Each structure stands twice: as C-alpha cells, then as structure tokens.
Amino acid sequence: MTETPEKTVRIHDSMISLVGDTPLVKLNNVTDGITATVLAKVEYFNPGGSVKDRIALRMIEAAEQSGELEPGGTIVEPTSGNTGVGLAIVAQQKGYKCIFVCPDKVSTDKINVLRAYGAEVVVCPTAVDPEHPDSYYNVSDRLVRETPGAWKPDQYSNPNNPRSHYETTGPELWEQTEGRITHFVAGIGTGGTISGTGRYLKEVSSGAVKIVGADPEGSVYSGGSGRPYLVEGVGEDFWPSAYDREVTDEIVPVSDKDSFQMTRRLAKEEGLLVGGSCGMAVVAALRVAERLGPDDVVVVLLPDSGRGYLSKIFNDEWMADYGFLESGGASVADVLRH
Ligand code: PMP
C-alpha cells in the first residue's frame, strides 16, 4: 500500500476515462489512541471532484443503451450539486443538455460550478414538504414533462446508482486492501454508495465485512423525523429505493457540530480538504474503530472536496454563528463523544 506506483505516460481520451480508481489513504492523526487501521477512500480525485461521477457515467450509459436518452436529449435531475457536476461533465462530452434543480441550502459555490460546466440551474426552497409543488422533487418532474427529449436519471431510484458502486467502488476497495477490509463506513444520501459497495463487499467476503452507515442526527436513516441539519448531501426525510436497508449492519448518527469540527481537523491534520459529509463519516468510522483492534481495517469513504464549503465550514464566522466552534481544540475523545 505504501509502494510508489510505476509512472506510466498515458493520454486519456476525455475526462470521462478518469472516473473511478481513486486512492486509499491512511489516516494518521485523527486516529490518535485507535489501534485499528483507518483508511480513507478519497473521492475528490474523480474528475468532477466527487464520488458522484461514478453514478453519472453509469446512469447515462445505461440510458443510452436502453434508448431512454436519445442523441441531443436533455438531462433533468434534482441534485445537491455533486451529481450535477458528474452528469454535466459526462453530458457535455456526449452532447446532451442539462437542467438541474437544487434546494436553496446548497452553497452558491456549488451552483456556480454547475453553471460553469454549462448546465442550467433552478433553485427551490428547502423548507417545504417533498409533496409541495415547489419542492425540488416536484419542480424537476414538471420540467421533465415540459422539456422535449427530457430524461430524468433519478438517482434516488435508479438501480444504476448502486450498481455503479457494486461494479467499481466495491471491487476497488477489495483489491486495494488485498481483502483485508473488515468495516466499510459511508454516509447515506440516496443510499447508492453504501448499498452497492456494501453488497459487493459482503458477497466477496461471504458476509465478513461489516457495513456502517453514517447519518446526520435528525435524518430518517438513524430514526429521526427528517428535521433540518446543515451537513449537505446526506440524510433524508424519506426512504429512497436506491437504499438497500438489508446491507447496513449499523447506523451511527452524528451531529452537525461533530461533523464540521472533524471536517476542519481532516484539513489541518491529514491534509484532506474535504466536505462536511466526509467529517461526518470519519466521526462514525472512528466511533466504530475505537471498539476494534490492530487486525481490523476500517475504510471510510470521503465523497467530495472542501472547496465547495469554504464560506461555511471553513469560515470561522459561519461556524461561530451556529456555536460550532465552542470547545474548539477539543481532544479526539471530546469530539467523538461530546
Ligand atoms: N456526501 C455528499 C457530499 C453527497 O453529495 C452525497 C450524495 N448525495 C453523499 C455524501 C451520499 O452518497 P449516496 O447518495 O451515494 O448515499
């Protein structure tokens, strides 16, 4: 795992061929006092900067094959940003248009990135029920009906979302750890990452690998009612069909404060400038790893980069306004248990 791979000179046909094969990196500092090995799967190495490039590619190619997406068609999707980036890159390279629908809690940085890739973005209120006509789910349905040649990937129900992880993320982890992985930890948004990766790892290890979901406190996955939380891209107020509940052995709820404090520690102590759902997943991974021993290998998936959150998580004023800086400089144990 520590050898330097041979440098090969290679030309990629387009950015699309850079999707997947992301690195696995050992966490050395936030793991103080933990004897298990904790490894991070760093998904911001994907060309669009997040894990969602994997599902974008798989969903688009499957829709081309089935005829649902025709040449010159328009992709319409409710997305909090990362899926949009992946879809926008694959779409522009293949000659499709994109219209994305985002909730208003998504940072303007993320929305501007989507527009930079040439997509159209429609912003909807967060504080309405999923059934409300202005909810981002309903607005996207209306756009699909009204746009000729429209196709909605629907990452929440599209089987090619978990399938992409079953076919790529899972096998990569098994190979990269040479079958030594004992626990896989990931946040749950659509549930695609944990369901597809988890199913592969369970199958290949005959059930030995334990699958742990990390969830914002208040989200339905950890028994909440869907009450608001600030960490982006994870947690839900409904149960999407992309999520296979059978796969997860345990769900660990994590507060916004713990998630964001850990996110800042990852940048400061591990050189990993990652997003808030990454901090959340690492808190869950460390809570699991605390109970384990030196033979255990915990892999935690870090979905995206911290660049989209500079004005929030990495901004002291924003953090202080929410009281997230209190007990700053706390020990690992404090942040983990608080
Ligand atoms: N973190 C971030 C930042 C995301 O955008 C997403 C996707 N919504 C996730 C985590 C969760 O991944 P999944 O949808 O595969 O459960």
Image (spheres, rainbow, N blue to C red):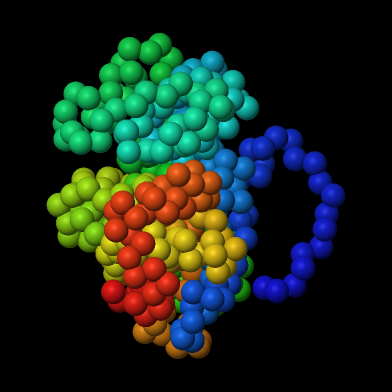
Query: What residue is at 38 percent from the left and 13 percent from the top?
Result: 147
Give the quarter of the figure containing the N terminus. bottom right
The answer to which of 16 and 267 lies nearer the viewer is: 267
Instruction: Indicate the quadrant where residue 23 lies.
Output: bottom right
Query: What residue is at 83 percent from the left and 54 percent from the top?
Result: 8
Query: What residue is at 19 percent from the left and 49 percent from the top?
Result: 226
Position of 153 with respect to 29 (left or right) is: left
The answer to which of 218 and 139 lies nearer the viewer is: 218
Give the quarter of the figure containing the C terminus. bottom left
Instruction: Indicate the quadrant where residue 173 lies.
Output: bottom right
Position of 127 with respect to 266 (left or right) is: left
| In the depicted structure, whether residue 14 falls above or below residue 335 | above
Judge whether residue 52 can be spotted in this image.
no
Judge whether residue 319 can be spotted in this image.
yes
The answer to which of 30 and 56 lies nearer the viewer is: 30
The answer to which of 304 and 96 lies nearer the viewer is: 304
| In the depicted structure, whether residue 301 falls above or below residue 207 | above
Residue 243, horizontal then vertical, whole percent: 31, 51
Query: What residue is at 53 percent from the left and 42 percent from the top?
Result: 53
Position of 25 with respect to 38 (left or right) is: right
| In the depicted structure, whether residue 335 falls above or below residue 271 | below
| In the depicted structure, whether residue 219 falls above or below residue 69 | below
Residue 17, horizontal then vertical, whole percent: 67, 41
